[in-house]
């Protein structure tokens, strides 16, 4: 998802798994899956840097007075069961 829109290489192997709105919809928890545990911190930093842009993109796609805050949770992909 991020690779085509943002130049930061740290986001190219990350994708949005799910979005959980708060009960009042003032905040969205965005679950991001990262290619490896070692990449989580860099992805988190890149998302922090891109936050204003990402929030503006959400604002363009919804019709509300207030744009929700976005909180990112970065996780490594689940290990496959043996």
Image (cartoon, rainbow, N blue to C red):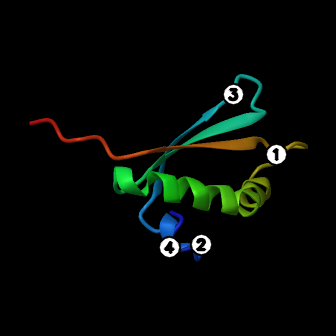
C-alpha span from label 4 to label 1: 27 Å
C-alpha span from label 1 to label 2: 20 Å
Helix, strand or loop under label 2:
loop
Where is mark 3, residue-wise? Answer: 22
The x, y position of residue 31, in whole percent, is 51, 42
Where is mark 2, residue-wise? Answer: 5
Where is mark 1, residue-wise? Answer: 67
> Picture quarter containing residue 35?
bottom left
Helix, strand or loop under label 3:
loop
C-alpha span from label 4 to label 2: 11 Å
C-alpha span from label 1 to label 3: 13 Å
Q: Earlier in the sequence, mark 3 or mark 2?
A: 2
The x, y position of residue 82, in whole percent, is 8, 36
Could you tell me which residue is drawn at 46 percent across and 56 percent down? 15
Question: Mark 3 and mark 4 in contact (Cβ < 8 Å)?
Answer: no
Q: Is residue 2 left or right of residue 75?
A: right
Q: Earlier in the sequence, mark 4 or mark 3?
A: 4
Q: Earlier in the sequence, mark 1 or mark 3?
A: 3
Helix, strand or loop under label 1:
loop
Could you tell me which residue is drawn at 75 percent across and 31 percent down? 25
């Amino acid at each position: 998802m991020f690779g085509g829109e943002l130049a930061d290489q740290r986001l190219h192997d990350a994708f949005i798994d799910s979005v959980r709105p708060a009960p009042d919809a003032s905040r969205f928890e965005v679950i991001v899956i990262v290619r490896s545990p070692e990449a989580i911190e860099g992805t988190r930093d890149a998302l922090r840097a891109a936050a204003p842009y990402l929030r503006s993109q959400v604002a363009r796609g919804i019709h509300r007075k207030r744009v929700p805050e976005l909180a990112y949770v970065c996780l490594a992909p689940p290990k496959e069961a043996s």
